Image (cartoon, helix red, strand yellow):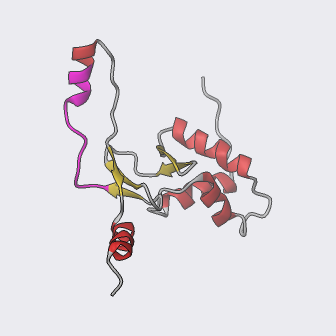
Amino acid sequence: MERAVRYSRKREAILSAIQGTSCHPSAEWVYQQLKPQHPDLSLGTVYRNLTFFQARGLIQSVGVVQGQERFDAVTNPHCHFICNCCGTVLDLPDIQPQVGLDEAVSRQYGLAVQRHELTFHGLCASCTSRQNFKEEPIL
């Protein structure tokens, strides 16, 4: 039996910070955003609460980007794009993970696949522009 979870202003603030942004924040980003309003907040508290929210399905991990795990409050199946240059993480809501793939892989390989993720990697529009600008000859 799971014990009751005590209300915490910091926990609520951490979840609100993640739900209030589309930047797919890291624990460090959340900590920096909340530290001015919660001076006694520790980075450890942020990490513990991120783990707590993940276990309850309130957020998901997008993966490690430039050395920091990034999180998403949108937990329904959707795809992401990660820029290899600047580390920007974008939701791709119009690209849906392939329906039936979990079942097909489960049958073919004798596994019990529960979900899959599709993440694209490359250069975002801003980094592509900068690279194209750098590659143009100087007249």
Query: Which residue occupies the extreme bottom position in the image?
Result: 139
Q: Identify whether 76 is placed above or below 10.
A: above
In percent of the image, x 33 and y 87: which residue is there?
A: 139
Q: Nearer the viewer, residue 65 or 75?
A: 65
In percent of the image, x 61 and y 58: which residue is there?
A: 30
Query: Which residue occupies the extreme top position in the image?
Result: 110
- Asked if residue 102 lies left or right of residue 29, the reply is left
- Asked if residue 67 lies left or right of residue 19, the reply is right
Tally of numbered discs: 0
Q: Nearer the viewer, residue 124 or 71?
A: 124
Percent position (x, y) of residue 68? 58, 49
Kindly indicate the quadrant of the structure image that contains residue 52.
top right
Camera sees residue 13: no
Camera sees residue 87: yes
Kindly indicate the quadrant of the structure image that contains residue 50.
top right
Percent position (x, y) of residue 14? 61, 55
In percent of the image, x 36 and y 60: which residue is there?
A: 123
Q: Identify whether 12 is placed above or below 133.
A: above
Q: Identify whether 46 is placed above or below 37.
A: above
Query: Which residue occupies the extreme right position in the image?
Result: 40
Q: Quadrant of the N terminus?
A: top right
The magenta segment is: 92-105
- Asked if residue 121 lies left or right of residue 86, the reply is left
Q: Nearer the viewer, residue 87 or 135?
A: 135
Is 93 in the magenta?
yes
Percent position (x, y) of residue 80? 35, 51
Percent position (x, y) of residue 29? 61, 60
Kindly indicate the quadrant of the structure image that contains residue 115.
top left
